[in-house]
Image (cartoon, coloured by chain):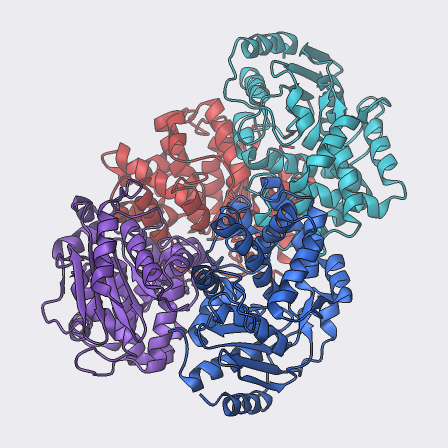
Chain colours: A blue, B purple, C red, D cyan
C-alpha cells in the first residue's frame, strides 16, 4: 500500500473541503481558542514506515483518547477483574449523560465514557501508591517518549468548568461505585484528559494496539494478545460516544476520539493512525478526522471487516 | 488452522458443561417446545472446507438472524438511501424496547433491531411488486438452496403473540416512519423471522459476508466490497441486541443472533460460522453459542481485532 | 357570589384577548375543521342557578373529559378493586407517551391518561354484557339527558388515525394488563372519546362531583361521599396531562380537560363549571379555557385551597 | 367537630397497628438511630383550639417539610418571578432522581423536590446579604417561636453523606441554573433540612397556610391570599415526592412530608395538622403518618374535595 501517496491525496481532499457544520467545544474554555483550520494526520506501519501530513507535529489536547491509556494500565494490572467495575457495552447515549448511570445504579457501561474513566482513575488511586506518577510514567513508557505531559492551563480550565463530571462522580459515589475521595479522583481524571501529543506521537503510542500488546520498538509486552484484541473490541463498540456505529460503519477500524479534535485508530497487524482537526460534529467527534479516516479505509480497501 | 480438531474440542467442552442459567424464550409459544440440550455448529471456509459437529443438520428458527438477509436485499436495491430510514448505531437497549423509538420519533437506530427490521420490511413492500416472493427468492438464491422456507406454525404463533411488535409498528406509524398497511408489514416480518435453516445452511449463506459480497460458489456479486464491509460493521456494533459489546469483546467477529438460539458470524476473507443451542441468556442470546464462538476465536487466536 | 356578572366579565376579557399561541390538535383530522374563535362557558350551582355565556349551547367533542365518566362507572361498580389495575399518580409525562408505560410494565399511572382509560374500557367490557350500551346509558343517566351521544364522524376519524393508542394497547397487551380483544377495547374507547356535549350539558353532568356523588336533581347516589372526594382528588392531580400542577396552581379546582378544547371543573359543595374553546397550548389544554377558569377563581376568591 | 375525641381514636388505632413494612432512611446516618415506635400528632384550629397526642412534644428532623418555609420566603420576596426558576408540576419521579433534571436541562419541576429547593436556596443567597440569618429568622417569625433551630449533628451527617444532592447541584450548575458557589448553596440547604420542630410547633407554623397567608396570632400578612392558595396548590400536587397522587387520594389535603417521618397538612380556613412517625414507606413518606391523616379526613368527612 502506498500510504505516502494516499495521505497526500487525503490531505488535499480535506483541505479543499468546507467543514461548515463543525463547532469548537464550548464547555472547556481553554479549547475554544484553537485555530479551527488545523489538520494533521500521521500513520505508522508495523514494518517501520512513518508518514505525516499537515499539522502532524503540533500538539493538541488528547481529552477522551487518553482514557484508553488509563484503561490499559488497569487492565494490565488487574486483568479481567477490571470488569467487575466497568462494563464493555456501548452506552447509546451522549458521553456526559447521567440518565443511564442512574438507571444502572452507578455502574458505567464501559471504560471509555466519562463515568467509566472516572472509575478507572479511582482504581488507579486504589492500586498504586503514587497514582499520578504511575499513570504518566506508564503513558511515557508506551509512547517511548519521556517528554509527554499534560497541559496545565487546560487542566485548570477543566477543573474549573467540569460540573458535569462532578455531578457524575457524586452520583456514582452515592451508589458506592467510587471508593476514593471524589476530588482526588477528579484531579487525576482532569490531568489525564489534559494530556497532549501531536498525531505522530499519538499514532506511535497506539501501535501497541496494532502490535498484539507489545510496545513497538522495544517489543516489551504490556497486554496479552487476547487482552489487546479485547481492548480493540471495546474501542470498536464504545470509542466514539453515541457515534460508535457510524465510525465503525464508515471507517471500520477500532479507535478512539476526543473533544480536542483528535482521533486515533489501528488496523491490527498493520498500522496505527491518528488525525487532528478541531471542529466537532454534534456528537463530539472531529468532522475532518472522521472524513480523513473514511477516505483512508475506502481508498485503501482495507478495514477489519 | 485445523478447524476439524478445533470444532471437536469445542463440541466436547460445550457438551461437558452445564448451562443452567439459560432459558427458552417465553413470548413465542411455538419455541417453548424445543429440546434445550441441542447444540450444533458449522464452519465453512472460503477455500472450500466444510465442518460440522452435533446437531448441525437440524433446522431451527432463525428469528432475528434473518433480518440480515432482508437488510441485504434493500441495501443491494437502494444503496445508501436505505440509511434515510434506519440508522447504524447500537441501541444500548433491549431489542423490543419502545422507549428510544418514542424519544427518537420513530426512527430506528439500526436495521437489526425489531423496529429497524419492520422498516426494512416496509421498504421491501414499497419497492417490489411481489414482496414476499422477492424476499424469499432472494434468500434462497444467496443460500444457494431452493428448499429454504419459513415454518408456518412458528409464523402463526408469532402472529398471534406479537403484541410488542404491533405496539412498535403502530408507534412508528404514528410518527409516519412506516408507509404501508401495518398488517401487511407485520405479516412479512413474521414470515421473515420464521425462516428455518440448519447451521450448515446458515454458515453457507453467511459466506456472502466473508466473501466481499459475492455468493460463494457462483461468485455472483450481491453487495459491493464496501457495502459488505459496512454490513459487517453494522453486525459488529448492532448484531446482539444490548449485548453487542460483550460479543465483540469475547468473540471479536461480526455476527447476528436470534432468539431461536442461533448465531451466525464471519471472519472476512476467511470463513463463516454458525451455532445453534436453544437456551438464551437474559439478553436473548444463546449461552452455549456465545461460549462456542468465544472458544473458536480464543483457541484459534484469530479475530478481526 | 354574583356569578352572572362574573361570567360576563370573564367573557368580555376572553373575547378581547388574542390567543395567538394556541393550536388545533393535528392528530384527529375531524377536529381540525373547528372554528378556532369559539368560546362558551357554563356554571351551575348546587342551589339551582344556571349561567351561560358565548357558545355555551354548541356541542363539541369531549375527548378525554369523557374518561371521568367511564372511570366513575367502574368505580361505582368495582369499588376500590379498580385500583388493582390503575394507579392514582400523576404521570409527569405527555398524555400519549409510552415510555413510562413500558418502564412500569403496562400498569397505567391513573385512569385519566390514555393508557388508564383503555384499561377502564377493558374493565367495562369484562364486567358488563352490553358494554357500549351500559356505558352510554350510564352517561345519559348522570347527565339527566337521553340525547347525549357520540359523534360518528369523529369516532371514525379517531379510529383511522389512532396509531398512538393502538401502540399503547398492544404494549399493555404484551404485559398482560389488557384482558380483552384489543380492537373491541379500542372501539369502545374511541366512541367514549367522541362523546359530544355543550358546556351547559357538561357542567350539568359534572354536578355529580360537586354534589357528594349524587345526581343533581334526582339525588340518586352514584358514588359514596368518600369515592367522590377521591375521584375529585384524582382529577386534581391527574386531570390535565403533564399540566396538572399548572391548572391546580392557577385555578385551584379539580377538573378535567380534553383535546376537543373543553374543560370541566367542580368546586365541591358549591358548583360545576365547563368551558369550551378549541385552541390548545402545547400540553393539549385549552388556552382560553384555562384563562377563563383562572379568572373565575381569582375574581371570586374561591378555590378549594 | 370533636377533634379531641377524633385524635384519641386515631392514636389508639395507630398504636394498635403493626407497621412492619416501614423502614428508617439509610442515607442520612444520623436519622438511623431514631426509635421507630414514636408517634405524635398535633392539630390546631383557626378558632384557637390546640390538640396533641403521643409524642407531640418531641422534636424531630423536618427534612423536606422545611422546603415549604424556604419557598415561602422567596415567594414573599420575589412574587411570581420565582417561577422563572422553578416550575409547579409534579415530577412523577423519585425525589432524588437526576434523570428528569437532565432531560429538562437543569430546570426543577417544582420548589418542593430536592433540585427545586436547591434553586430556592440559591435565590435566598442571591437576594439577601445574610442568607442563613434571614432564612432562620423568617422561620422563627412565622413559627412565633424564637427557639427554633437546626440540629448540628444532623446537619453534619447530611453534609458528609449528601452525594446525591451534590450530584444534583453540579448537574444544575453545568446547565447554569445555579448562580452561586455550590458549596454555599449546599450548606444552606443542609441546614434547612436539619431544622427541628415537634408536631405542635410544626402545626402552629403551618397555620399560616390555613389562614390565607397571615401569621396565626399576630395576623401579620406574609403571603397574599392568592399566593397562599397557590402555595397550597403546589403542596397538593408536589408535596409527597412520587406519591402526591396517593396522598391527595387518601387524605385530600395539601401538605408536605419529610424523610424525618414528619407530615404537615392544612385544611384552608379550618386547621393545620402535623404528624410524626419515623418508619417510611418505599416512596419516603411516613407510613403511620399517612394512615393517621387518612383516618382524620375519613372519620371527619372533611377534606378540600
**Any part of residue B260 in sight:** no
x, y percentage for residue B119?
33, 67
Q: What's the residue at 60%, 47% (across, down)? A: D98
* Image quadrant assignment for residue B52: bottom left
Quadrant the C terminus of chain D occupies: top right
Residue at image x 54%, y 41%?
A: D92
Q: Is residue C156 left or right of residue D236?
A: left
Task: Depth check: give the residue in front, C124 or C260.
Answer: C124
Q: Quadrant of the N terminus of chain D?
A: top right
Can you give x and y, in whole percent of width and height, for residue B275 in the image?
A: 23, 58
Residue A111 visible in this rendered orientation of the protein: yes
Q: Is residue D138 left or right of residue C40?
A: right
Residue positioned most to the right: D129
- Count all numbered tags in the image, as a single digit: 0
From what the image shows, is residue C139 above or below residue C98? Answer: above
Q: Nearer the viewer, residue B74 or A92?
A: A92
Say which residue appears at 20% left-offset and 50% top-offset.
B160
Q: Please, is residue C120 above or below residue D285 in the view?
A: below
| Residue C176 screen position, x and y as percent | 31, 40
Which residue corresponds to the image point at 28% horizontal and 67% vertical from the top-left?
Answer: B68
Q: Quadrant of residue D34?
A: top right
Amino acid at each position: 500500500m502506498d500510504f505516502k501517496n494516499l495521505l497526500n491525496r487525503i490531505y488535499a481532499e480535506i483541505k479543499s473541503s468546507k467543514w461548515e457544520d463543525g463547532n469548537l467545544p464550548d464547555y472547556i474554555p481553554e479549547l475554544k481558542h484553537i485555530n479551527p483550520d488545523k489538520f494533521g494526520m500521521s500513520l505508522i506501519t508495523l514494518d517501520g514506515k512513518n508518514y505525516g501530513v499537515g499539522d502532524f507535529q503540533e500538539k493538541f489536547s488528547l481529552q477522551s483518547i487518553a482514557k484508553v491509556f488509563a484503561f490499559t494500565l488497569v487492565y494490565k494490572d488487574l486483568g479481567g477483574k477490571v470488569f467487575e467495575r466497568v462494563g464493555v457495552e456501548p452506552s447509546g447515549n451522549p458521553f456526559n449523560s447521567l440518565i443511564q448511570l442512574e438507571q444502572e445504579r452507578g455502574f458505567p457501561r464501559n471504560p471509555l465514557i466519562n463515568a467509566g474513566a472516572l472509575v478507572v482513575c479511582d482504581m488507579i488511586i486504589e492500586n498504586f501508591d503514587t497514582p499520578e506518577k504511575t499513570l504518566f510514567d506508564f503513558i511515557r513508557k508506551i509512547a517511548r517518549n519521556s517528554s509527554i505531559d499534560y497541559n496545565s492551563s487546560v487542566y485548570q480550565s477543566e477543573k474549573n468548568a467540569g460540573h458535569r463530571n462532578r455531578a457524575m462522580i457524586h452520583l456514582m459515589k452515592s451508589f458506592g461505585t467510587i471508593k476514593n475521595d471524589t476530588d482526588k479522583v477528579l484531579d487525576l481524571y482532569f490531568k489525564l484528559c489534559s494530556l497532549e501529543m501531536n498525531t505522530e506521537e499519538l499514532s506511535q503510542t497506539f501501535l501497541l494496539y496494532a502490535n498484539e500488546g507489545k510496545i513497538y520498538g522495544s517489543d516489551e509486552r504490556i497486554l496479552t494478545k487476547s487482552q489487546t484484541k479485547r481492548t480493540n473490541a471495546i474501542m470498536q463498540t464504545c470509542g466514539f460516544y453515541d457515534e460508535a456505529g457510524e465510525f465503525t460503519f464508515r471507517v471500520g477500524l477500532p479507535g478512539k476520539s476526543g473533544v480536542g479534535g483528535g482521533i486515533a485508530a489501528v488496523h491490527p497487524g498493520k498500522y496505527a493512525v491518528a488525525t487532528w482537526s478541531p471542529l466537532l460534529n454534534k456528537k463530539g467527534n472531529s468532522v475532518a478526522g472522521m472524513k480523513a479516516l473514511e477516505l483512508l479505509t475506502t481508498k485503501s480497501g482495507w478495514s477489519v471487516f
